Amino acid sequence: MQRLAAVASVLLLLFAPCAGARAAAPTATGSTAGPIWAAQLAWSPAGAPMFPAVLAAWPESTFAQLAARGIHYAEINMEWSAVEPSPGQFTFQTLSLDLANAAQAHVRLIPIFWYAVWGGNPPPWINQYDIGSNGATSQVPTWWSSFNRHAYFTYVTQTIAHIKSSPGFGGAFLDYGWLDYMWGPGPGSGQSVNGYAPQDIARFHAWLPTRYHSLADFNRMYGTQYDSWQAVPAADPGQPLFSVYQHFRAWSVAETYGRLTALVRQQTSAPLYYYWGGGFGGAGTAFNLPDTFFQLARRYHVTVVLDDADHTGLALLFGSLARAYGVRLFEEWTPRASGLHAEIVEFLGHYGFGAPNEVGMDFFLYQGGREYTVGFPQYVRWIPVLSRIHGAYPLQPVAVYVSYTSAFDYPQALSGMSERLAGIWRALPLAFTVVTNQEVAAGVVRLQQFRAVLPLNGGSGPTITAYRRHGGRVLDHAWQLARYASPYVTLDPLSEGVEVVPTVDRAARTAWMTLTAWESIWRYRHGVAIIRLAGLGLPPGRYHVVDAATGAPIPSYPSPAELRVPLNMTPGQMRVWEVLPGPGATLAQPPRVPSVAEAVLPYFGG
């Protein structure tokens, strides 16, 4: 009884009637009215403990309850085994009913196609699994198995062909490999990587002559004496030719996603999405290099989804990539059961990083518990406020440079890179661009456009060497960035426990600033936020601040170049300020600045 009562209370909390006007629904398949606010669901109510297992399909009432809260997109985790229980035998009844029920509630349903490692994926009749460099069997089906690949491509394209005309169809997520982690983690411990099944190695030998001009050139390049391409080994981590095999694995991701997307584009022009996750630490293991997906997304008009959007460094990177490649960016948060009050606002506060390419956010509803009693109401609460934000991230003429090159030799070489990016930005809240070596190679970014560049790695590589040779300023320390760019805000006293993300509409001389207390322990009281107009790209003049959620004025101490605003925040708090031109509520004198000991204190609730 207690468990049933708990489930009922969660349902009541999530889907109780809410006051206010409903958000505008999509007007046609694949089109949107404003930002996309989504929730992700399991394949069926029976697969989600928080919902009663009554129907195989989600009822219309579930979609109506989501729509009433401003959520007009629902992603559903497909189960390949449920749709294609045996090869070539498709059962679309449940999915068709889901789409019909969603359409009745003016919700667009976006199926998520998984190749593996999710309930029902792959089906049991897929029995060829990859092998790691350590010889152990992987959890991921063999990447280059012709049977696996053809079966999965057929499943995706046949399903989309069947549902693409449904009024509830809102596009599709395309995945291959391990969830959004591509090749996936290697089996066992240590530095093992996937991709050593016989089919993978056979495809590697077929790839080699397309990569290198001739076998003689290959031998000269690597100091080898092979007499055939078949003799070139699929090298393990740590072996001399490992980087060659790494380039093959990286190419495999691009080729497979490109081929799958091209096939789906023959079926539909509806929105398509690529998932990215797993963090920088897996760049040389899973080969989830972000630029691979942005390059494909630009070619096939696909939206990239950052599944780790609560990670500040990744959100910074993906915002920069979206602008450089001209690709739409979507942010998702997968809830965890600890630190949720702080974690949910950190995720929501990152909404402006991708502007103007940011198109929305998604909350992952996949099981019951505190993730939903804490996180989901916050997500729903801020949808109307975040929907009003428009403009662009106010870029400054400086960049932080990241090279992926080392990941081809050392799979974990980029571990910690996201944390380094976040640390720089929190200490120096100025809107720098994150530039990758692959962006420069693709010609979508020129380092010469920046007044100064800080390399986090690859500082002695050809890209930075060429930039320096042509007169570019290469920095040694992060604090030097402030010599060439203006911060948009300064916290006095400084606290990295508060994140501030701006979005600026320069034409209207208006800015929005999300402020989040993202740490779960430290509070910030009696401090001062100094909003700097030059850093926002706004002209000097008179401005005032209002609470974007309530419209209430926030008194500030103005000057022609800045606004000083008192700031008090406890862990898990979020605010959205709107900076508007003209006079408003003012303070008679500048707010007092406390000592660090007074301002930054541990918080234990209450």
Image (cartoon, rainbow, N blue to C red):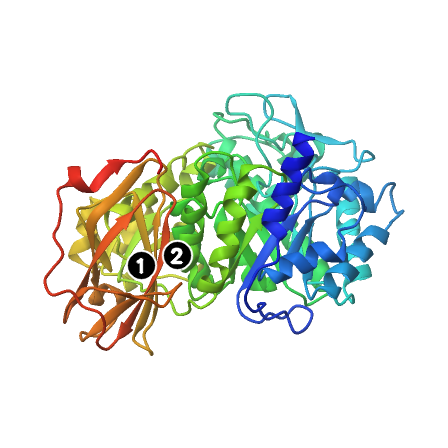
Depth check, front residue: 184 or 599: 599
Give the number of the disc on residue 278. Answer: none
Residue at the image position 59 percent from the left and 35 percent from the top = 184
**148 left or right, relative to 210:** right
| Marks 2 and 1, how far apart at CA | 7 Å
Q: Position of residue 466 (x, y in %)?
A: 29, 54
Depth check, front residue: 356 or 199: 356
Q: Name the residue beneath numbered marker 1.
A: 447
Q: Name the residue beneath numbered marker 2.
A: 440
Residue 349 vertical placement versus 235 (above, below): below
**247 left or right, relative to 259:** left
Could you tell me the amino acid type at mark 2?
Val
Depth check, front residue: 29 or 388: 388
Could you tell me the amino acid type at mark 1?
Leu
* Quarter of the C terminus within the rendering: top left
Mark 2 burial class by Cα count in 10 Å: few <14, some 14-19, many 20+:
few
